[in-house]
Amino acid sequence: MYDFAYHKPASVADAVKLLGADGEAKPLAGGQTLIPTLKQRLARPTAVVDLGAIKDLAGISVAGGKVTIGAMTKHADVAASADVKKALPALAALAGGIGDPAVRHRGTIGGSIANNDPAADYPAACLALGATIKTNKREIAADDFFRGMFETALDAGELIVSVSFPVAEKAAYMKFDQPASRYALVGVFVAKTAGGVRVAVTGAAASVFRWKEAEAALSKSFAAASLDGVKASASGLNSDIHGSAEYRAHLIGVMAKRAVAAA
Amino acid sequence: MGAEGIGAAVRRKEDFRFLTGRGNYTDDINRPGQTHAYFLRSQVAHATIGKIDTSKAAKAPGVVAIFTGADFAADGKGGLPCGWLVKNKDGSPMQEPPHPVLAQGKVRHVGDPIAVVIAETREQAKDAAELIDVQLTELPVVGTMADAVKPGAAKIHDGGNVCYDWHIGDKDACEAAFKKAFKVAKLDLVNNRLIPNAMEPRAAIGDFDRATGEYTLYTTSQNPHVIRLLMGAFVLQIPESRLRVVAPDVGGGFGSKIFHYAEEATVTWASAKVGRPIKWTCDRAESFMSDAHGRDHVSHAEMAMDKDGKFLALRVKTDANMGAYLSTFAPAVPTYLYATLLAGVYTTPVVYAEVRALFTNTVPVDAYRGAGRPEATFLLERLVDNCAAEMGMDRVEIRKRNFIPSDAFPYQTPVALQYDSGDYQATLASALKISDWAGFEARRAEAKKRGKLRGIGISTYLEACGIAPSAVVGSLGARAGLYECANIRVHPTGSVTVFTGCHSHGQGHETTYAQLVADRLGISIDQIEVSHGDTNKIPFGMGTYGSRSLAVGGTAIVKALDKIVDKAKKIAAHLLEASPADIELKDGKFVVAGTDKAKAFGEISLAAYVPHNYPIDTVEPGLEETAFYDPKNFTFPGGCHICEVEIDPDTGVTKVVKFTAVDDVGRVVNPMIVEGQVHGGLAQGIGQALLETCVYDGNGQLRSGSYMDYTMPRADDLPSFDVATQSTLCTHNPLGVKGVGEVGAIGSPPAVINAVVDALRETGVRHIDMPATPAKIWALLNSGRRAAAE
């Protein structure tokens, strides 16, 4: 990797100040993408601002029908949390299926959604559950947050503080692994919440998206059979050596049904 | 068999150091004053090289030196040699283009090394490499074998893109047999290209000693003497007496660490230039584009049969990818290690095979676990299933009907090999029983209730290993003999060091070889150390590959033990005042036959080194012997693999739910190690069948260039294996051993694919190329469904 300055601020305010002062600085929130990128010399930040010492950013609370997870909470902690397992078991299961144990003990929810990898798991949960992403400046609805491949609504220097997930009546996440990387080739999160049925798809396209046809069908009856004959369009989906757009479209249907059955 | 002798499942002596992190690998070695090398590699697949400007890079912090191909050439050093000459159909030699250590004039694949930067640290070398300005003029890319032979294709080498066009067998007899055929089964198939991926990436340290003028190369090699010979004699012109090659602990090879690589020659040569040791350690991404790849065949095969389903003749046409340059053994793999195996376990009287080897703008392709034999086995065992389908016969029955009978050995095939022993009915019967073949249809029906497509597949394979009789391979174009050497040093108090030319990099030689000695001398394996991997310690050796270590290297040990025992008997006879003819070696004691007069092994060894009471007029002091052993023939392991899969028709995912392997590996020295070798081979064979594949795009860029896209088999991809041995003994080596290193990778891929095709048969699927990925199966199922609906 190239040389860079390293900062480890103790507060969000200090972190924001460091990032604001240097447009080429990068926040480090677990580093499961950033560190490999640096090692491969694919990024050359002037500074890395490690958020790992900011105590306020980590933690889980369940209150008022919401599960709120601090941005620097590790996947393993979400997966193991008795509170999350009780309130939103689908979210705990999703966190427990991210990467491998090493990744789950370094990677964080804030890092994952700020990066918005097209094949990341958490964005599907955020979108399907209608989560609210709280930053140092504002609150952003998940529907407005994920903008495109590795693109989010975050401004330069804006940091995620926490993510709030409304508790769902029923929810489940089903992931079809890309065989080599075991990222989601297709991952589908279905949720039946007070706000209605939402279906979010990750892995299949440039960014996580909602499958509105499935939502409409499931709104009538939240049962796998409701999706019979509902086909996801292959248009705009990814195609690579692991699967064509048509295959991904097909898997969206299969994973959605399995998720509904499991919810 | 003693508790630690031949046949005992003793725990591996080497595992303590490996499991406690005390192994000593090349990258663990650091020499005083060591510098670090980084190779600037081509990012494009085919280009001419213009000016290389290293002036900026040379001034970068920490840089010690920068070398390019021009520097290498100016020093009068050679290119990387190829160890095997294959001839064209007309008898002319193959095209053998130069293989520069560092590119000269052109780059021919992504990863082709252009320059090396030597710096105080690896990071500094990397930083400086980015400052080298290389003017490249891109040329049209020959990405695939189909591209290579297109009219007007860009020429990778001056002689074009064909390396050789070779054949074996009787073409006329083959044509005649096909004319008489009752039915003909046909098959087009691809043997997918693989990237070896040993756990330890390659590494090398060149260390020139200015005081003595001696060179030392520490390297990740399966055969340090071969590297010394190739690099010393052909590349750098260093006499063996001044070149030491050390291969310390090596973390897996699978063939990819047989070959002499550019980085080894570069660091050795450059260490003299800069007067300091130079270390190079490959990173994983770099290994994807610089280690020799494996397999990569495209074939058409046809089998002629009579009305009883007896095979009359086999006709095969294969194109084999050599990559951009000829790696050390590359030409031999799709010829003498492939086409000679096409008779398999069958009495097919006529076989005719044509093989074209082609250059492409890809990484060189060479031997990978099985090397040619998996390709032959996959083709034959897939084709035999098609033969059964063509004849409307049972897959097992057609195999039985065509097996070479167990009383027909030695059996001469129509493609050069003479099998010494085997019993294919026996391995088949055992595998059918263990796998409960007969009960399969009930399991299929039960799976169907769960919505799963269950299939069963069989492969009755044979391979040739224990390479090789030197005169035979010499007549086939090998430029080296393939014997092996062992030196046994008995120390004064009776402990023993075995020096072997067969390097161990996962195979467990330190245990298996010790068992051979323990068995013979009647001493504990704790008293026996096995030393390998250092050309300054071991007289000579051809190394470890082709499942040869026991059949050839082990036999050399046996031959050296014969000499030790012979000499020890003479010493014992003197001490016991008897005739050497009356001395017997029993349970570690030399006994006068029919008496209780005896001397322990340690007493004899002490007498040999402290010869106060000694037959000094007729016997030299000391107890150390060396033997070279050249095998009389190849060995021929074989057996039967049976695979059961379940396919999820919704996703196309295949799960291997049951796998049975019954192998004839000859005499088994350590059953635990044999089982482990089979497990590893099966993992790689199932990996090839279902998961692994190397993909290049049309520009010669590696799309499967990391673990993000290259699917290695993981534990949860594999079932618990049912492994057994059912052995006949090799008739031409004293141990009766055949070899086990490759059988798993050779026998399993067709068993897996035959099972997948069986599972999909009712949907109309007749073939699927490896790897049978979920996406591929889904696409086949989907087209099948569409076809059914139309």
Image: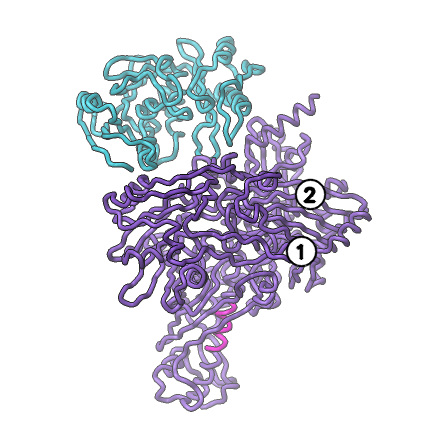
Chain colours: A cyan, B purple
Label disc, if present, on residue B385 of the rendered structure: 2
* Of the image marks 2 and 1, the number of the one nearer the N terminus: 1
Label disc, if present, on residue B710 of the rendered structure: none
Question: Which amino acid, by three-letter code, is at mark 1?
Answer: Asp
Q: Between B304 and B269, which is closer to the camera in this rendering? A: B269
Disc 1 on helix, strand or loop?
loop
Q: Between B369 and B103, which is closer to the camera in this rendering? A: B103
Chain letter of the residue carrying label 2: B
Question: Residue B716, how many percent across, how many down?
Answer: 47, 39
Q: Main secondary structure of the magenta part?
A: helix
Label disc, if present, on residue B90 of the rendered structure: 1
Is B560 magenta? The answer is yes
> Is the Cβ of the residue at disc 2 closer than 8 Å to that at disc 1?
no
User: Magenta segment range?
Assistant: B555-564
Chain letter of the residue carrying label 1: B
Question: Which amino acid, by three-letter code, is at mark 2?
Answer: Asp
Q: Is residue A175 above or below residue B282?
A: above
Between circles 2 and 1, the one closer to the viewer is 1
